[in-house]
Structures are given as structure tokens and as C-alpha cells.
């Protein structure tokens, strides 16, 4: 590579005509655009399916807290609440864990330990959602019911968030924990990339001032990488919002708005997956599910674009190039 | 008894300019990167309150030498060092000595300026002090002004101390890095080609600054610029292939070197 670069063009025959190059460019552009078109098409189809519901409920769909198929009344609020609440719980658990792991991997861990740990985390990302859900139902949920819930209630029972019957274990907290396990790998690996892109010279500056490892990490690495790390978190959020199978298996699927960790709930994704088979082929019910899908698509697209923007613009706060 | 070095140490303090004693003493200093020996039993005295220039062709171990003087090389996992370095008589590699403490006493300025981009100008200056646990606002403010004055940057930034550090020009950023290193009041300042990325005007700023600073600090500067070494240094050490070839007062090294290699290098006839 290097050699052909520095050699004069005379004896370096170029393969392919400029025409082929141009065609290749167009082809790849077309493929990139087709992805965009696909998303637009999905959005359009959802919109078509949701037309009845859109027409019938209008904006009230988003703020109505009744999801009542028996009386044919549909409001998205319980599912929106469940989606946000389970995602927030997941972030609270996964962000410290993911970023902490990334810091350990890039700044502190001995070299021989890094590769095995990275492999393990990537393995975690490869566990199929349904397997995780299965584990959640058979191990996590009973454990929550018999051990964690009573224990948490004893410690924090004075807070409304921890009150209420411990119930079956199928709960918001179960969903949050499962989601956390699912998004830790992405938060860790994206954060790791971000931390690795912090220039070594920044670390050296802090070391040369007599900083300890932790101080160097804090003043030279974390503050430099802030924005990128935020992007990693938002990317994790994007994953959590749309996750379906495992959440559906442990959340209890109850369309209610109860701000209690031990109460069952539902998410937009879990409602769609859970109920679509039971709906009549036409009518308000399937249409409302379509609209729920439309809301979910909109939210995840926006969140993901936001995350991508944060990560793209993170070339680090640029240090002025010197003359 | 340690083995006797093949190179007899040349004491800067034997010569007239080093009237303040010796700041750093290196004896039989060898540094290895894995199996590769980069520095070969270098023995050298760094005079206090004087400027010592390190010159030599690229890859001869100048930066490695500098980084051994404040234990920065320990950040490279495969680096290993042998020999003895004393800071005003104290063994900086002794068991009980923390590298963190050594680096506070022996500061460093890098080739490429590296201010902390998320911090303001003032925060960059005081970051080392704050690491040391200094919290008192008035002291921090005083030290900010004092350090920026010493780095000849005060007049240019006094009205925008809270602007981001990266809003400064390249030369200003480098002087800010010098101010940052000075703020913790080190005894020795190591500078690795501090002006090589700057234009001639900014370079002359830095050179004047170094001449000013040597009244209070002991300075070791690596440079590829022979005129610069001649202009600002009291002593010059010429390294070649990891060995210290010649060391003495700058006048002598440049006008009347003892070794042929030195003469070839300082006159630009190096092959
Ligand atoms: N981290 C490292 N790992 C392995 N080898 C290294 C490392 N750093 C430096 N070296 C080797 O040590 C030798 C001396 O390097 P050093 O950076 O001290 O040279 P220098 O005299 O400062 O050169 P320059 O003038 O180009 O800055 C070189 O051969 C270099 O390849
Ligand atoms: Mg160097």
C-alpha cells in the first residue's frame, strides 16, 4: 500500500476504468437510499394500518390511559409509560456498569485480561433475546419474588416506588433488569471505542502533572469523552425502547400506569407482539396496534438519529491545528 | 560497588555556568523497550537553574532520556530502566518514592501542545494545583496570574481567562501548557521539542521565555534546531544511537567539540 502510494503513477497500473468507478458509486448510493426508502415505506404502511385509529382518537390516543379492548377504547399512555419506565430502569443499571466496564477495559485492566473480557461482553450481546427472556421467567422472576423484593421493601419500603404487593415477580423491575443486561454490551463497546479515541497526549498531560490513574481518567479522559459517552448511552436507550421478546416474557403485560417497581406493566413493543394475534382482521383494535407501532418507530428513529449525531460529531472537542 | 561506566560522567558543575549545583544526576542510565536497548549507560548531570539542551538525530533516545527523568516511561508497559537518577541527591526510583510525586517535582512540556480542551484557560493553569488538593480561591487566582505571567501569556489572556483553552492560537496553547506545568512549581522542567510545531515568532516567544525561566527553574530541552540549542542553552548533550557522545558547555560543544561525530552533527554534515 504505502509503496504504491509514494510511487509515481507511471508504473502503477490502475484497475478499472473511471466509468466503472462512477457506476459503483451510484450503485452504493442507491443501496444507501433504499434503506432510507425502506424505513419510509414501513412508516407509510404503519400509517395506513393506523388510519382508523388516527382518525378515531386523534391526539388523545397519546394521552389516554385506558387500553380496553373489551370496550374498544385504546390509549397509548400505559404502553408509553411502561416503555419509558423500563428503559429508564435499564439505563440506571446499565450506564454505570457499561461505562465503568469500558473505563476498566481501556484505562485500568492488565493487558492480558482485556481481550477475554471484551470477548465475554460480546458474547453477552449475542445471546438471543428469547433465551434471555426464558432465563428471566424461570430464574430471575422467582428470585425477585422470593428474595429481592422482600429485601428491597425492608430497606426502602418508605418510598412509594418500592411499596405495594410484591406480587408474582413479573414486573417493571424484572423488565428493567433484563433490558439492562441486553444493553450493557452495546454501551460498553461503544464507550470503549470512544475512550480509546481520546488522544494519548491528553493522558500524558495529566500524568505529567502528577495525576494518579483515577485523576488522569477523570480530568483527561472522561471530560474529553463526555459527549461521545452520552451518545453511547442514547444508543443504549434506543435499543431498550424497541426490545420486545424478553421484555414481554417478564413484564407481566398489564396495561396500567403504576409507578411501582414491583407492579406489572406493558411496553409498546410487548403490547403489539402480545396482542396482534388476538385481534380481529379489521377494526379499531388492530388499527390501534398499528398506531402504537407508528409511535414506537417514530420514537426509536428520533432517539437513534440523536445518538448517531452525538457520536458523529464526537471527533472530540477539536484542538486547534498548529501552523 | 556498581559497575563502572565506560563513559566517565562529565560533570556540568565543573564548568563555570553551573553555579547553582546539580539538579538531576543520571548514572549508568539504560532504558529498554522489550529486548531493544534504547539508552546505553548514560551518565549526565543536569545543572540547576540552567538550560541543558539534548541534541541528536531522530531515534537516538532523546525523548526516552527525558521521560526517564520523571518516570513517564513507566506508562509504557514494555519499558524497563536500569541505573540511578537522583533529584537534588534523592533517588527518584527508590522503593518508597511514588512516581506521582516525582512528576510533580519534575514537570514536562510536550512537542504538541495538549491543553485540556473542555477546560477554560484558567482551569488549565490550576488543574495541577487542584489535583494536589488546593481549593482556596484566592490562592488559585494568584497562582493563575503568576504562572501565566511566567509563561509570558498573561497580557494576551487576562481578559478572557474563562474562555475555552482551545480558543487560543497554537503558540499560545503551548505557552498555556508551560504555564500549566509551572503552576505546580516544579523544580525541573523537561521540554520535548516545545517549539518544533510553532512558527518563527511563536518560537522566539518560547525561547525568550525559557531564558527567563532558568532564573528559577532547571530546564532540560530536547531540540532539533541547532541554532536554538546554541541560543538558549548553557550546556549541550549530544546523543547518538542511545549513547551520550559528548556533553559540556554549549559554547564548547558547538565551537570546539571533542568528538568527530559531534562536530559533524552540529555543523550539519551528519550522514
Ligand atoms: N513505546 C515504545 N516502544 C518501543 N520502542 C520505542 C518506544 N518509544 C520509543 N521507542 C524506540 O526508542 C528509540 C528512541 O526513541 P526516542 O523517542 O527516545 O527518540 P528521539 O531521540 O526522541 O527521536 P525524535 O528526535 O524523533 O523524537 C527509537 O528507536 C524508538 O523506536
Ligand atoms: Mg523525541
Image (tube, rainbow, N blue to C red):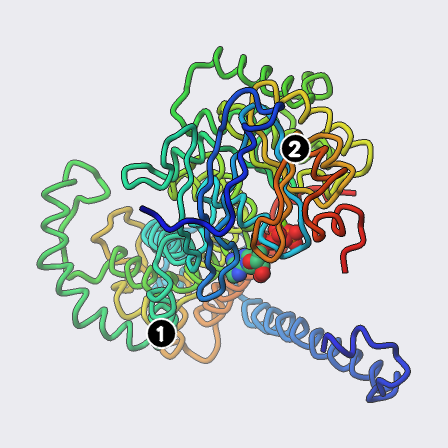
Identify the residue under disc 1: A123
All told, the count of numbered labels is 2
Q: Whole-percent x and y of residue A313?
A: 64, 52
Report the side of A224 relative to A114 (left or right): right
Q: Is residue A217 visible?
A: yes
In this rendering, the answer to whether A65 lies above or below B201 is below
* Residue A184 percent across, percent down from the top left: 37, 61
Question: Does B16 sit left or right of B186 as displayed?
Answer: right
Asked if residue A300 shows in the view, the reply is no
Q: Quadrant of the N terminus of chain A?
A: bottom right
Residue count near mark 2 (Cα–Cα under 10 Å), binned few <14, some 14–19, many ≥20: many
Q: Which residue is mark 2?
A: B249
Q: What secondary structure is marked by label 2?
A: strand
Q: Taking A145 as reference, is A116 above or below it?
A: below
Quarter of the image holding residue A125?
bottom left
- Which tag is nearer the camera, tag 1 or tag 2? 2
Q: Which chain does tag 2 point to?
A: B
Q: Given the image, what chain letter belongs to the residue carrying mark 1?
A: A
Helix, strand or loop at label 1? It is helix
Q: Say whether mark 2 and mark 1 are on the same chain.
A: no
Amino acid at each position: 500500500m504505502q509503496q504504491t502510494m509514494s510511487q509515481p503513477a507511471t508504473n502503477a497500473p490502475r484497475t478499472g476504468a473511471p466509468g466503472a468507478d462512477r457506476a459503483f458509486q451510484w450503485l452504493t448510493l442507491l443501496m444507501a437510499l433504499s434503506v432510507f426508502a425502506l424505513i419510509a415505506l414501513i412508516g407509510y404502511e404503519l400509517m395506513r394500518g393506523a388510519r382508523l385509529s388516527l382518525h378515531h382518537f386523534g391526539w388523545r390516543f397519546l394521552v389516554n390511559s385506558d387500553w380496553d379492548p373489551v370496550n374498544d377504547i385504546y390509549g397509548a399512555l400505559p404502553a408509553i409509560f411502561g416503555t419509558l419506565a423500563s428503559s429508564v430502569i435499564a439505563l440506571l443499571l446499565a450506564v454505570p456498569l457499561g461505562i465503568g466496564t469500558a473505563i476498566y477495559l481501556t484505562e485500568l485492566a492488565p493487558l492480558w485480561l482485556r481481550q477475554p473480557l471484551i470477548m465475554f461482553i460480546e458474547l453477552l450481546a449475542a445471546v438471543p433475546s428469547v433465551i434471555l427472556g426464558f432465563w428471566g421467567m424461570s430464574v430471575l422472576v422467582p428470585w425477585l419474588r422470593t428474595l429481592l423484593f422482600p429485601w428491597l421493601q425492608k430497606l426502602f419500603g418508605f418510598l412509594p416506588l418500592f411499596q405495594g404487593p410484591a406480587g408474582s415477580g413479573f414486573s417493571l423491575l424484572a423488565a428493567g433488569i433484563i433490558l439492562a443486561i441486553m444493553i450493557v454490551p452495546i454501551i460498553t463497546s461503544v464507550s470503549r471505542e470512544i475512550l480509546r479515541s481520546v488522544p494519548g497526549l491528553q493522558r500524558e498531560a495529566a500524568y505529567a502533572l502528577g495525576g494518579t490513574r483515577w485523576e488522569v481518567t477523570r480530568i483527561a479522559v472522561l471530560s474529553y469523552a463526555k459527549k461521545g459517552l452520552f451518545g453511547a448511552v442514547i444508543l443504549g436507550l434506543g435499543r431498550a425502547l424497541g426490545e420486545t421478546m424478553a421484555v414481554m416474557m417478564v413484564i407481566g403485560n398489564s396495561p396500567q400506569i403504576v409507578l411501582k417497581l414491583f407492579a406489572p406493566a406493558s411496553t409498546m413493543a410487548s403490547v403489539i407482539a402480545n396482542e396482534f394475534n388476538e385481534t380481529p382482521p379489521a377494526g379499531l383494535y388492530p388499527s390501534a396496534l398499528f398506531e402504537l407501532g407508528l409511535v414506537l418507530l417514530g420514537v426509536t428513529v428520533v432517539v437513534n438519529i440523536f445518538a448517531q449525531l452525538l457520536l458523529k460529531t464526537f471527533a472530540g472537542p477539536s484542538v486547534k491545528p498548529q501552523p | 560497588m556498581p559497575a563502572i561506566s565506560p563513559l566517565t560522567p562529565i560533570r556540568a558543575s565543573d564548568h563555570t555556568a553551573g553555579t547553582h549545583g546539580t539538579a538531576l544526576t543520571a548514572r549508568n542510565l539504560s532504558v529498554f523497550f522489550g529486548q531493544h536497548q534504547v539508552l546505553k549507560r548514560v551518565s549526565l548531570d543536569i545543572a540547576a537553574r540552567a538550560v541543558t539542551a539534548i541534541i541528536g538525530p531522530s531515534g537516538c533516545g532523546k525523548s526516552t532520556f527525558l521521560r526517564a527523568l520523571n518516570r513517564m516511561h513507566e506508562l509504557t508497559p514494555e519499558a524497563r530502566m536500569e541505573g540511578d537518577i537522583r533529584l537534588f541527591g534523592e533517588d527518584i526510583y527508590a522503593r518508597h518514592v511514588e512516581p506521582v510525586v516525582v512528576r510533580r517535582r519534575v514537570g514536562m512540556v510536550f512537542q504538541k501542545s495538549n491543553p485540556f480542551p473542555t477546560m477554560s484557560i484558567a482551569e488549565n493553569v490550576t488543574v495541577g494545583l487542584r489535583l494536589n488538593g488546593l481549593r482556596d480561591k484566592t490562592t488559585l487566582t494568584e497562582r493563575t496570574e503568576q504562572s501565566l505571567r511566567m509563561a509570558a501569556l498573561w497580557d494576551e489572556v487576562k481578559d478572557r481567562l474563562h474562555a475555552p483553552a482551545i480558543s487560543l492560537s497554537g503558540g499560545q496553547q503551548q505557552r498555556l501548557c508551560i504555564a500549566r506545568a509551572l503552576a505546580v512549581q516544579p523544580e525541573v522542567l523537561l521540554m520535548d521539542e516545545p517549539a518544533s510545531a510553532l512558527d518563527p515568532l511563536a518560537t522566539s516567544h518560547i525561547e525568550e521565555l525559557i531564558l527567563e525561566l532558568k532564573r528559577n527553574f532547571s530546564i532540560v530541552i530536547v531540540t532539533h534546531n541547532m541554532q536554538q540549542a546554541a541560543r538558549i542553552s548553557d550546556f549541550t548533550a549530544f546523543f547518538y544511537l542511545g549513547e551520550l557522545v559528548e556533553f559540556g558547555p554549549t559554547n564548547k560543544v558547538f565551537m570546539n567539540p571533542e568528538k568527530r561525530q559531534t562536530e559533524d552533527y552540529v555543523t550539519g554534515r551528519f550522514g
